[in-house]
Image: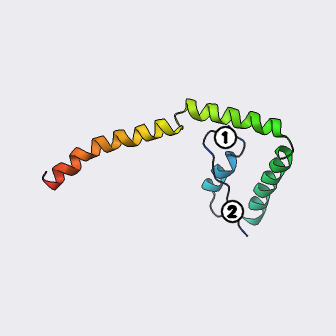
Amino acid sequence: MIVAVGAIAGSDGLLQGLPLRLRQDRALGGEQLEAMIEECVAKIRRYLPDEAARDRIAAAGRARAERSGYHNDAQVAKIVERARQLIPLVRAAAGR
C-alpha cells in the first residue's frame, strides 16, 4: 500500500519537507521511503495525543495562509481578475 502525503498550504513546516523530498526524487529507494514513513509516524505519535500543540500548529498555519494570500477570497479574486483579462481576448478571437 502506498501512502501519499500532500502539502497543506500554510502548514508551517510540519510536513512540508516530505512532499518536497518526494518531488525531488520520484524514484525513492526502499530505505528512503521507509525513513520518510517513519518520520510521518513519529510526528503522528507526537501530535495525535497533544491537542494543544495541534491547535497551535493549526492557528499558526491559518495565520500564515491568510498572510500569504491563500485564503479563499484572495484566490477567487485572482481567478476573477484572470477571467476579466481573458474574456476580451476570447471574444476578439471569436470575432465578437
Instruction: Please name the amino acid that badge 1 sits on.
Output: Ser
Q: How many marks?
A: 2
> How far apart are labels 2 and 1 at the CA level?
24 Å
Select label 2 or label 1 by which is in front: 1
83 left or right, relative to 66 = left
89 left or right, relative to 43 = left
Residue for badge 2 = 28
Q: Where is residue 24 in the image (x, y as percent from the top left)?
A: 61, 54
Q: Which of marks 2 and 1 is nearer the N terminus?
A: 1
Q: Position of residue 42 (x, y in %)?
A: 84, 50
Q: Is mark 1 on a helix, strand or loop?
A: loop
Residue at image x 63%, y 58%?
Answer: 25
Q: In which quarter of the image is the N terminus?
A: bottom right
Instruction: Please name the amino acid that badge 2 sits on.
Output: Leu
Residue at image x 39%, y 43%?
Answer: 79
**Does residue 78 sit above or below 42 in this rendering?**
above
Q: Position of residue 60 (x, y in %)?
A: 69, 32
Residue for badge 1 = 11
